[in-house]
Structures are given as structure tokens and as C-alpha cells.
Image (tube, grey):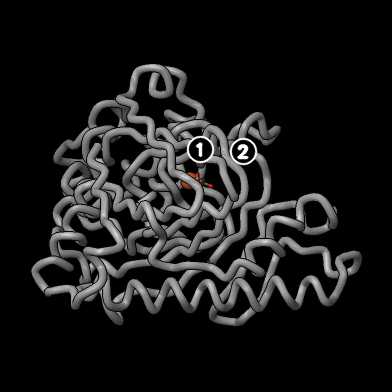
Amino acid sequence: MDLVTISRESLSGVVSDAQARSWCAQLEAGGILYFPETPVPIRHEDIAFLLGQQQTDSSLHKNIAYKPNVDKLSGVDTKTADAAAVARLQSIMRQYSKSVVAFLTGFLSPYQGKWELDYASFRPQEEQGRDLPLRKRNDLLHTDAFPTRPTHGARILRFFNNIHPSRTRDWVVGDPFATIVRQFTPAEIAPSPDSGLGRVAKGLGRAVGLGAALPSIKRSPYDDFMMRFHNFLKENERFQAECAKYAWQFPAGSSWMVYTDAVPHAVLAGQYALEQTLLVKPEALVAPETSPLKVLEGIAGTALV
Ligand code: SIN
Ligand code: FE
């Protein structure tokens, strides 16, 4: 898979429309845009504060989410956490979220105004050897889907900062969605003239042993598939063993961005990262035919949202 390196110098001038479109196209084709020196720098004292959390305050240990639209943190136990520390964390996350958006507004101008701002996160845990239930493990290759936040065809674009003072964040990525969905998805969802919505959902459901759709969350058939596919990939030993693998180590102080709904990824080691998720609307895409939605609709022969 392509890793496109973008130097600090190349960002100093005004980004042309053609250049911005080509960056969008590279992302949509399953590439990773990699910034050896982050274009979203974080103040030293803020990094020092974030690095201090792991040692000092057990209530701030988990992945912590920040919801920019309502300016709220989650994953923090406010009953036991020090109120001043929580307020500081919130203000750092608020600033981080704003800075990523400000950068991407210019950098990915074709998407401007056509995304929804999703959560940001602070990831203070060591990733190597994390003890998590299988479907929550991030050291297994997977494409992202959110159990409680269906996207209805919007794309999951994630921007990361490795804020560890010295260590790399070690990823493995695979071939993009259009390749793996054909290579590894069970025959039940292969395209056929009668494969309607129900068939796509039911077919993969049977293959991954899920039975009926999960209740209570309004998912489109697309979201249903993407959620099942996430689980299916993590649970599938043949996929984990046989899929193409490309290892990337993102150094301290770097940033990278990728469509994690289409690029299978796993994090094997590393500690302390910040991340902001954007949901890019289908009409913003510069190459919509390569999107998981269009690929799946091609396979199903029918609309899925
Ligand atoms: C993931 O989205 O699977 C985790 C990526 C990371 O935390 O580096
Ligand atoms: Fe993921």
C-alpha cells in the first residue's frame, strides 16, 4: 500500500486545488498520507501533561474520547478523577480537535464543509500486549465500523498524532476494501441477480454467525455489512494469516491520516496518541466508485443506504 510522505516544506505555500484533489484521491485509493513532522503541533506543556496521566491518575487510563460537537469528554471517571486534570484534558482535546479541523480545511479543500466532525481520542495505553476481548482488539487487522454510530455511507477518515517522546507507533496495513472484500468475503454475499438488501445482510450474518441484525440501532444495510465485516475480519484466521501486510512505523512527533473504513489496519505497539475522526460525506469523494458503499452496491446490485 502506498505511503505518501508530505514534508513540512511542501505545506508552507498555498495548496493548489489540483494538489488537494490528488491528496484526496490518494486517500480514497487506500493510501496513507504521512507527515514526518506533524502539521498539527501540540504545545510542549500539553504533551507533558498528557504523558503524565498514565503514571499519576488511574481514572484517566483508558482511551478517552472527546466529542467536539458537544464539547464533552467520555471515558473519564469524573467521580474519582481530579477536576482540574479533567478540565485541563478537555481543553487540550478541544484545542487539538480545532487544530486538526483548521489544518484539514485547507489541506483537503475538496472535502471542505462536506464532513461531519466525529470524536477525537487520547490513547494513553501501551498497545503491545493489551488484554482486550477479540472484537475490541486493535492488534488484529480490521476495517473500522462504529457499533453505535452508523455512517450511512459517509467515510471514516482518521488523523493521528504520535505524541510519545521517543517511540514509534507500529502499524500493519493491508490491501484496501475493494480487494479484500472480493478475496475473503464468503460466497454468501457474492453478487447475484437476486441479491437484494436482505441477502447481503443475511449472507454475511450467517457466515460470521451473528444471526439476525442487532436490535435498537438504526443501521442501513451498508452499516450492517460494515459492522459484520469488522467482526468477520478480526475473527477470521485465514484473513489474518494470508492477507497482504505492509508494516509502517510512525515516529514520535509524526502524523498520518487514512480512511480506516477501507484500509485494514492493526496497531502492534506504541503508546500515547491523539486522533480525530471525520465522517466524509459520499458526495465529497473525488473517486466515489472506489468507496466501500459503491463497491458493495456493485456486488449486491442494489442500493444499500
Ligand atoms: C485502530 O483504529 O484500530 C487503532 C489505531 C491506533 O490506535 O493506532
Ligand atoms: Fe481501527
- Does the closest atom of ligand 1 sit within 8 Å of the Cβ of label 1? yes
Query: SS class of the residue under badge 2?
Result: loop
The reply, left or right, for residue 14 in relation to residue 99 is: left
Q: Residues within 10 Å of mark 1 (few under 14, many from 20)?
A: many
For the point 45% across and 37% down, which residue is it?
Answer: 171
Q: In which quadrant of the rendered view does residue 228 lie?
A: top left
- Which amino acid does the dot numbered 2 rest on? Glu
Residue pointed to by mark 1:
267
Q: Nearer the viewer, residue 11 or 21?
A: 11
Task: Answer whether labels 1 and 2 touch (C-beta < 8 Å).
Answer: yes
Look at the image and tell me in which quarter the N terminus lies.
Answer: top left
Residue 97 at what x, y percent from top left?
A: 51, 73
Q: Nearer the viewer, residue 261 or 97?
A: 97
Residue pointed to by mark 2:
127
- Does the closest atom of ligand 1 sit within 8 Å of the Cβ of label 2? yes
The reply, left or right, for residue 174 in relation to residue 89 is: left
